[in-house]
């Protein structure tokens, strides 16, 4: 079971479009690299956001 804060952030991120979602993932990744683990659950949030980001990528129609 995930933390309520993680669920709330992922719910918010699910409503974002691709550029904003990418910026959020990149910012959290850089923050996680610079400040290792004083922010709890950052790794879990990054995995969830990366999953949302990859799920939103689609191939153009007509390409296989």
Image (tube, helix red, strand yellow):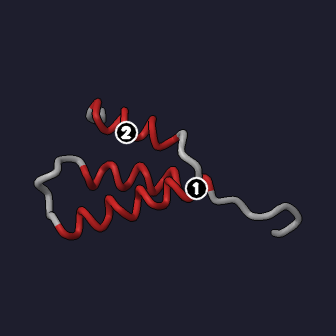
> Does residue 18 appear left or right of residue 60 in this picture?
left
Residue lying farthest to the right in this orientation: 62
Q: Residue at x 85, y 61 (%)?
A: 61
- Residue 12, horizontal then vertical, whole percent: 45, 37
Residue at 55% over, 59% down: 19
Q: Is residue 62 left or right of residue 43?
A: right
Q: Is residue 3 above or below residue 50?
A: above
Place of residue 5 in the rendered image (x, y in percent of width and height, measured from the top left): 28, 34
Q: Quadrant of residue 28?
A: bottom left
Residue 48 place in picture, x, y as percent:
41, 49
3 sits to left or right of 59: left
Q: Earlier in the sequence, mark 2 or mark 1?
A: 2
Q: Residues within 10 Å of mark 2 (few under 14, many from 20)?
A: few
Cα–Cα span, label 2 and label 1: 16 Å
Instruction: Name the one closer to the observer, 41 or 21.
Output: 21
Q: Residue at x 41, y 56 (%)?
A: 24
Q: Residue at x 49, y 60 (%)?
A: 22
Task: Describe the element under mark 2 as helix, strand or loop.
Answer: helix
Marking on residue 9: 2
Circles 2 and 1, Cβ within 8 Å, touching? The answer is: no
Q: Give the numbered dot on residue 52.
A: none
Name the quadrant containing residue 9.
Answer: top left
> Across the whole image, how many numbered discs are drawn on residues?
2
Q: Secondary structure at mark 1?
A: helix
Q: Position of residue 50 (x, y in %)?
A: 45, 57
Q: Residues within 10 Å of mark 1 (few under 14, many from 20)?
A: some
Identify the mark at residue 18; answer none if there is no mark.
1
Q: Is residue 56 above or below residue 15?
A: below
* Quarter of the image with the N terminus in it: top left
Q: Pick out the residue farthest to the left.
A: 38
Point out the image quarter for the C terminus. bottom right
């Amino acid at each position: 079971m995930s933390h309520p804060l993680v669920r709330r952030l992922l719910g918010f991120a699910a409503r974002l479009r691709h550029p904003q979602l990418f910026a959020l993932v990149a910012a959290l990744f850089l923050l996680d690299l610079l400040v290792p683990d004083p922010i709890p659950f950052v790794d879990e949030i990054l995995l969830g956001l990366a999953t949302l980001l990859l799920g939103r990528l689609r191939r153009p129609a007509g390409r296989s």
